[in-house]
Image (tube, rainbow, N blue to C red):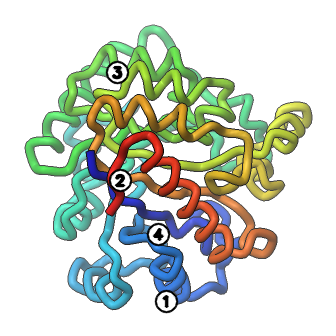
Amino acid sequence: MSVRIGTNPIAWSNDDLPELGGETPLETCLSEAHAAGFVGIEKGNKFPGDPDALQAVLARHGLVLVSGWYGAALRTRTVEQEIAAMRSHFELLRALGSSVMVFAETSDTVQGRRDVPVAERPRMSEAEWPGFLERLSRLGDWMAGRGVRIAFHPHMGTVIEKAEEIDRLLDGTPPSVGLLLDTGHLEFAGEDPARAATRWAGRVNHVHAKDVRREMLAHARRQRMSFLDAVVAGVFTVPGDGMLDFSAALAPLAKAGYQGWLIVEAEQDPAKAHPLTYARKGYAHLRATAEQVGFRTG
């Protein structure tokens, strides 16, 4: 059971809030990611969109491209329309050897709206579920057949956030639709990351390891904060700096034979949380925990 440990550029430059780390050069992000020990990184908005250019800049820093975020609207699009919308991103990931694509259903999402509490996220109606699951199944099969599988990301502010929604989604789709286990989003949603890992270990094909600050989570809920305001306030941090038990979350995956990436991904304000300092802290804790539960890390 071998895993690789990577990171996400969001600790250096935030895609949803460009003012957070907007002045940080891509080269700084990549050099510090390598210095912290990571061997791979997910795509951010400062990365080149040309495959050759992206390959070259990553290679200079000893990194590979792990994956990249895609916000879908499959509730309102046909499969063919969704493929057309994601095609350039999909082909970039495919060209650089990524085996999964971070995929979230972002129709009507409030994740990027600071004027809306995250608690007021959209919900899917009963009438929508069958068609959505059928389209997601077809899309999952199409992507898997081309070597880049869906890693479905339950995300705060979207229609797929709670454990019951994750269960319904995975029960209604084939194995070509994998689950991205995001410890921080599950905890924020009021769910148990270890429970999700245990139930769906065989479907997990990607992991985002983020920790949660207990006091700030309670404050965000009391104040009915938007998702982005909670991020700026510091609800998330790197593994080992918050309340979560990563041994409990990772052990079921090790037992199931998970072989993939573990990604340190913690949205923070880089002016408050020095990226390299926190990257090193998160890497050390995640690697030690992974090895403790039985993974080999490379």
Residue under label 4:
44
| Label 2 environment density (alpha carbons within 10 Å; few <14, some 14–19, many ≥20) | many
In the displayed structure, would residue 235 be above or below residue 96? Answer: above
Residue under label 3:
170
Q: Residue at x 67, y 74 (%)?
A: 277
Mark 1 residue type: Glu
* Horizontal and vertical percent position of residue 99: 22, 53
Q: Give the label, 2 or 4, closer to the camera.
A: 2
Residue 133 occupies quadrant:
top left
In the displayed structure, would residue 174 be above or below residue 158? Answer: above
Does dot 1 land on a helix, a strand or a loop? helix
Q: Residue at x 72, y 36 (%)?
A: 118
Q: Who comes first in sequence, dot 3 or dot 1?
A: 1
Separation of marks 2 and 4 at Cα, in angstroms: 17 Å
Q: Give the label, 1 or 2, closer to the camera.
A: 2
Does dot 4 land on a helix, a strand or a loop? loop
Separation of marks 3 and 1 at Cα, in angstroms: 38 Å
Residue under label 2:
261
Q: Give the label, 2 or 3, closer to the camera.
A: 2
Q: Who comes first in sequence, dot 1 or dot 2?
A: 1
* Horizontal and vertical percent position of residue 122: 61, 28
Regarding residue 114, the answer to whether it shows in the image is no
Q: Residue at x 17, y 44 (%)?
A: 143
Q: Who comes first in sequence, dot 3 or dot 4?
A: 4
Front residue of this view, candidates 235 and 264: 264
Q: Who comes first in sequence, dot 2 or dot 3?
A: 3
Mark 4 residue type: Gly
Separation of marks 3 and 4 at Cα, in angstroms: 27 Å
Most extreme residue toward the top, as rendered? 126
Residue under label 1:
27
